[in-house]
């Protein structure tokens, strides 16, 4: 018993050290600051998907996770927006071997094809043979921590699957008015809150996890969201409380409606800041198809009207603004995409907001019924061995470097 007590004390001591070393950030006006030093922290992130049927971060059949983490650090990314499903959050002890078997049925592909990918992943990451899905997230986060890469956990979906549309059952809270089965059948509100709380508590053991995004690309259909966004205000506030109950150190990242394109309504009605403390961060998305009109000026005006105005200092709504998804084809982009990139980079340079490119992954275990699906927007090539397009940092230009501050 003495040995067991000593071991327990040692584990508690290590946990206390881990918590003491946590990266704690806060919002102050339009900036994200280090809570200890008051210095600005500029987020330069890549999205790493982990929300699909296999319920672990993508790419482990191609590279040891340490290699992927090192690639991010070497190429000046200081954070990852790591996506997860509520399915995974509420079933954290599922063995990875079982998750790949279950993924085959869920994704409509053969069991042998998913088991083949699992075998490849174990050959690159031997620890996977005894790992759980939550344990795999932990290992990925730890490898990022070892290379000074921060993590924002993003609740992408409830049912583990590709996102997004208005028929995947993940788009809008099932408890909200105007229930639509196609858009909401998997978005159980209580499960969502429990999943957020669980992941926030999980983050206590990982000092480089700096925040949680409440939900990716909220989207209403039919008669949903027809009440002045009352359901949005209600459930976003509940989600923030759940995160704060699980871990009050975390930034709480809040997106608007219409696929995270629209936060314009905050101008006239602000959320209750008391719920968030100094942890509120706004997020929005932007792609080539997100623009209104045919000119760069009209696209930039749309971004300003729907989200960019939140950066104006000393307003009730002022807060850091995180462009948590943007992207384009990394091989042979179209003329429209090239024009979009130039326009977006100019806007982001002028506003120095936080950002996360979609996506890191060069491929998926399975996506939309296809195994080893190639991600043409991926920074990494299809076998995750290096840049798909090495000119990417030059394309973003000063978005990598700008670090204004208060």
Image (cartoon, rainbow, N blue to C red):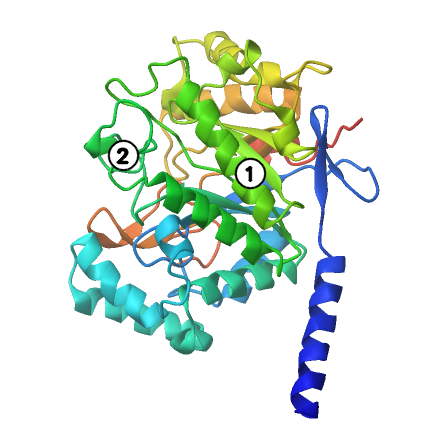
Q: Above or below — where is 258 with respect to 98?
A: above
The quadrant in which residue 271 appears is: top right
Residue at 72%, 46% (x, y): give it.
24
Horizontally, residue 304 falls left or right of residue 405, namely left
The local crowd at label 1, few if under 14, some if 14 to 19, many if 20 or more residues have their Cα within 10 Å, is: some
Residue denoted by label 2: 184
Q: Above or below — where is 133 with respect to 196?
A: below
Check if mark 1's residue and mark 2's residue have beta carbons within 8 Å. no
Residue denoted by label 1: 241
Q: Can residue 342 be seen from the camera position used here?
A: yes
Q: Nearer the viewer, residue 222 or 4?
A: 4
What numbered label is drawn on residue 383?
A: none
Q: Can residue 360 be seen from the camera position used here?
A: no
The picture places residue 72, in percent across and down from the top left corner, at: 57, 52
Q: Nearer the viewer, residue 242 or 307?
A: 242
Q: Above or below — where is 178 with respect to 276?
A: above
Horizontally, residue 375 falls left or right of residue 35, namely left
Helix, strand or loop at mark 2: helix
The picture places residue 337, in percent across and down from the top left corner, at: 40, 25
Horizontally, residue 186 falls left or right of residue 6, namely left
The picture places residue 255, in percent across and down from the top left corner, at: 49, 28
Q: Nearer the viewer, residue 352 or 270?
A: 270
The quadrant in which residue 60 appears is: bottom left
Residue at 64%, 59% (x, y): give it.
145
Residue at 49%, 13% (x, y): give it.
265
């Amino acid at each position: 018993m003495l040995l067991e007590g000593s071991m327990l004390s040692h584990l508690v001591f290590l946990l206390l050290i881990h918590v003491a070393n946590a990266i704690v950030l806060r919002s102050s006006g339009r900036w994200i600051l280090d809570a200890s030093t008051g210095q600005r922290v500029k987020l330069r992130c890549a999205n790493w998907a982990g929300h699909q049927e296999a319920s672990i971060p993508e790419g482990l059949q191609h590279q040891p996770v340490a290699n992927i983490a090192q690639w991010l650090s070497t190429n000046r990314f200081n954070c990852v927006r790591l996506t997860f499903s509520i399915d995974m959050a509420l079933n954290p002890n599922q063995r990875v071997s079982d998750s790949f078997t279950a993924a085959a049925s869920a994704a409509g592909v053969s069991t042998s094809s998913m088991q083949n990918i699992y075998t490849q992943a174990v050959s690159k990451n031997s620890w996977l043979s005894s790992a759980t899905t939550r344990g795999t997230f932990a290992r990925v986060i730890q490898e990022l921590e070892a290379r000074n890469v921060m993590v924002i956990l993003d609740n992408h979906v409830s049912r583990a699957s590709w996102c997004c549309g208005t028929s995947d059952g993940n788009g809008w809270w099932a408890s909200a008015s105007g229930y639509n089965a196609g858009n909401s059948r998997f978005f159980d509100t209580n499960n969502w809150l429990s999943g957020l709380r669980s992941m926030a508590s999980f983050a206590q053991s990982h000092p480089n996890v700096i925040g949680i995004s409440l939900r990716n690309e909220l989207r209403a259909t039919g008669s949903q969201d027809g009440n002045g966004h009352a359901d949005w205000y209600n459930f976003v506030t509940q989600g923030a409380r759940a995160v704060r109950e699980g871990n009050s150190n975390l930034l709480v990242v809040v997106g608007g409606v219409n696929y995270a394109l629209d936060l314009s309504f905050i101008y006239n009605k602000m959320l209750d800041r008391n719920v968030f403390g100094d942890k509120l961060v706004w997020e929005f998305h932007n792609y080539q198809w997100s623009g209104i009109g045919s000119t760069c000026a009209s696209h930039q005006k749309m971004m300003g009207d729907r989200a960019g105005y939140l950066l104006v200092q000393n307003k009730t709504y002022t807060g850091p603004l995180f462009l948590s998804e943007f992207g384009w084809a990394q091989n042979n982009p179209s003329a429209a995409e090239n024009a979009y990139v130039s326009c977006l980079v100019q806007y982001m340079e002028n506003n120095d907001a936080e950002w996360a490119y979609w996506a890191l992954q060069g491929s998926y275990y399975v996506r939309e019924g296809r195994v080893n699906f190639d991600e043409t927007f991926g920074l990494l090539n299809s076998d995750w061995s290096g840049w798909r397009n090495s000119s990417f940092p030059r394309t973003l230009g000063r978005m990598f470097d700008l670090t204004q501050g208060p």
